[in-house]
Amino acid sequence: MLDQSTTPTYDIENEVLNRYQAGAQEHEPSLCCPTEYQDVQYLDVIPDEILTKDYGCGDPTRYAQTGDVVVDLGSGAGKNCYMVAQKVGAAGKVIGVDFNDVMLDLARKYQQDIGSKIGFQNTEFVKGKIQDLKLPLAPLQKWLADNPITSVEQITNYEAEAERLRIESPLIADDSIDLVISNCVLNLVKPSDKKQLFKEIYRVLKKGGRAVISDIVCDEIPTAKIMNDPELWSGCISGAFLESEFLEMFAEAGFHGIEILSFEKEPWQTIDGIEFRSMTVRAYKGKEGVCLERNQAVIYKGPWQEVKDDDGHTYVRGERMAVCDKTFKLLTNENSPYAGQFIPVLPYENITLEEAGSFDCRVDVRRHPKESKGQDYNVTQLTDGTASCSTDSCC
């Protein structure tokens, strides 16, 4: 994480706001990386004014699924939102969050027209800070217009109203979103707010939900010269994440199944010998919960000799490793990030959740086969050699 002693002294939020307000008025090529979209057919209904004034560095839109409720952080002119709106369909919903009124106006300008073309209206654009997704800024702005602050004492009233809105009318509710996407925006948040930003992404996702974030990363810590250049900050350079730090931010927030989906071979820009490039990462929410013993095991298929998960548990190739019920489901569910990597081993006699005792997840233990079969299991079963193996069998 960036050392706070190197945090710029200028107002990062104002620099970013001013730069992107200008970018909403006139196309600024330096604000985006060349990006290839997988589902280009979804661009056909989007007006050129949006396409030329929307900036990004990757394609998180390809990971949306039918019926998803999606939040786009830093939605800008709305290109990614309108692409995703078509993917999730009428049963889904897309919420674009941005702090820039000029960008929000541009995104809303074509909202009805695009909805008519695709056959349904499933987009919403709201004003908010992506590091504070509980606070709805539109009603707070209205309150401020009716209650202008003219003294230091009145700041307390403003803060109280903001907190009331977070509690009573959160912009994005807890555990309400299937997919959070963002395209080259997280780097624009000031360093002191970045941990809170990842906590907010985690908070709004449902259990089993995922985040797919495209952003700019660097291979070395930016120099003081880079950090103190306002134009480089608003241009997605100074606030870039270190490559390893970007992944670690997800882990610290509680995510699992963290995976690099794309990593540009060639840097987008190189400054003072430091390379800046686009990276797209996917991470999942859902490893919370109690650890219960139901005599389950998993066998890691390989090819590595052993692997370690985000909680430090080691899985040895070919070995029956004891796991709790929560971890068993995480590793073997067909929709999990680990699908297909583990062989599930269920006990012959089911232990209900009510009957299950606690499981000590602090230690790695191999599961003896008799724990799954039962200590009294003493069956002899021979075949006559005529039975054929199924395509799923091991023979």
Image (cartoon, rainbow, N blue to C red):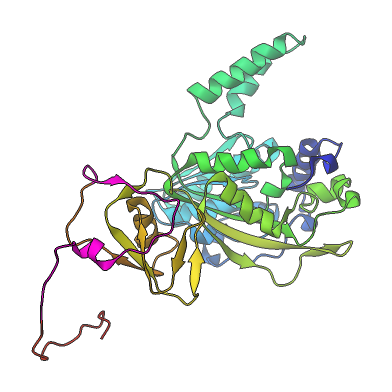
Q: Residue at x 39, y 49 (%)?
A: 360
Q: Residue at x 73, y 63 (%)?
A: 277
Q: Residue 292 appears at what percent x and percent y?
A: 32, 47
Q: Residue 41 appears at what percent x and percent y?
A: 52, 65
Residue 140, placed above or below residue 101: above
Q: Residue 168 appears at what percent x and percent y?
A: 48, 22
Q: Nearer the viewer, residue 224 or 387?
A: 387
Residue 315, placed above or below residue 79: below
Whether residue 261 is in magenta: the answer is no
Q: Nearer the viewer, residue 16 or 106?
A: 16
Q: Nearer the viewer, residue 96 or 198?
A: 198
Q: Residue 145 appears at what percent x and percent y?
A: 68, 16
In the picture as drawn, the residue positioned furthest to the bottom comes out as 385
The answer to whether residue 278 is left or right of residue 82 is right
The answer to whether residue 330 is left or right of residue 84 is left
Q: On the image, which quarter does residue 199 sit in?
A: top right
- Residue 113 visible from this viewpoint: yes
Residue 255, placed above or below residue 366: above
Q: Which residues are magenta?
A: 353-381
Whether residue 361 is in magenta: the answer is yes
Q: Residue at x 43, y 53 (%)?
A: 88
The answer to whether residue 286 is left or right of residue 46 is left
Q: Residue at x 35, y 49 (%)?
A: 359
Q: How many marks?
A: 0
Image quarter in which the C terminus is found:
bottom left
In the picture as drawn, the residue positioned furthest to the right comes out as 225
